[in-house]
Amino acid sequence: MKILEDKILERGKVIDNKILKVDDFFNYQIDIFVLQEVAKFIASRFDHIDKILTLEVSGIAFAVAVAYEFGNIPVVYGKKVESSTTINDDNYICTVHSFTHNVDNHIFLRKSFLKPSERILIVDDFLAYGNAAMGLIDICKQAGATVVGIAAGIEKEMQGGRKRIEALNIPVISAARIIGFKDNKPIFSKENY
Ligand code: 5GP
């Protein structure tokens, strides 16, 4: 999506040819216009979604924008804790390795928020190795809910998340698809998103 790619080129900062910081417009400070355009694009690619599932914190704003485009469907988000000992049986739990912070987080979500009949779109700000998405897919599986797709604002395709998810026959859509970094500059895919 040109508007997001342009914004990344203009305002993004790449660290060590690995991490892309988009703090100025997509994470800590959010450009609402860009967010809404990206959300419109994502929502146009999926049908019949009952609920959006994301992960705190950075997925929430984007997930809310996408949900609004579907006509106000609910957003639920997994919460992260480093120790699982305080999580009771009312919750689904999975473990997700965070590559940006190099820690394992336990993700939990109250069981009553997901139903077996529901069609779920998993949304996150970034898709990289796919650990967060795989964890949320696992939670949907525990609930018996159907994962209709994974949608990311920004994808770093070279880190392999897409391959892992597509191997499960789950479609992946991202609004900016980065295939590599060179001299701390992103290279975007020419393929259809
Ligand atoms: P994954 O689990 O797919 O490896 O990474 C996805 C999660 O890690 C996202 O929730 C995102 O917050 C964070 N993340 C991964 N790579 C980046 C990055 O390059 N920049 C930022 N800002 N976050 C990232």
Image (cartoon, rainbow, N blue to C red):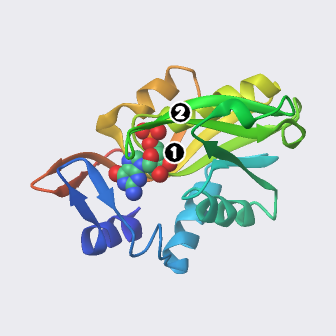
Question: Horizontally, is 32 left or right of 102 in the view?
Answer: right
**Vertical arrangement, residue 29 with respect to residue 192, above or below:** below
At 44% from the left edge and 33% from the top edge, which residue is drawn? 162
At 76% from the left edge and 23% from the top edge, which residue is drawn? 142
- Residue 176 shows in this picture: no
**Vertical arrangement, residue 39 with respect to residue 77, above or below:** below
**Res 58 quadrant in image:** bottom right
Specify whether tag 2 is near ligand 1 (CB below 8 Å): yes
Question: Horizontally, is 89 left or right of 53 in the view?
Answer: right
Q: Residues within 10 Å of mark 2 (few under 14, many from 20)?
A: some
As measured in the structure, the alpha-carbon distance from the residue carrying label 1 to the one carrying label 2 is: 21 Å
- Identify the secondary structure beneath mark 1: strand
**Res 186 quadrant in image:** bottom left
Look at discs 1 and 2 and give the one toward the viewer: 2
At 62% from the left edge and 42% from the top edge, which residue is drawn? 81
**Vertical arrangement, residue 26 with respect to residue 19, above or below:** below
Q: Position of residue 51 (x, y in %)?
A: 78, 48
- Residue 39 shows in this picture: yes
Q: Position of residue 59 (x, y in %)?
A: 58, 56
Question: Horizontally, is 21 left or right of 72 in the view?
Answer: left
Name which residue type carries label 1.
Ile
**Counting residues from the N terminus, which is met first, the one under dot 1 or under dot 2?**
2
Name which residue type carries label 2.
Val
The residue indicated by pointer 1 is 173
- Identify the secondary structure beneath mark 2: strand
Give the residue furthest to the top: 167
Viewer-closest of 133 and 8? 133
Q: Residues within 10 Å of mark 1 (few under 14, many from 20)?
A: many
Give the residue furthest to the left: 183
Q: Position of residue 79 (x, y in %)?
A: 67, 47
The residue indicated by pointer 2 is 96
Viewer-closest of 3 and 103? 103
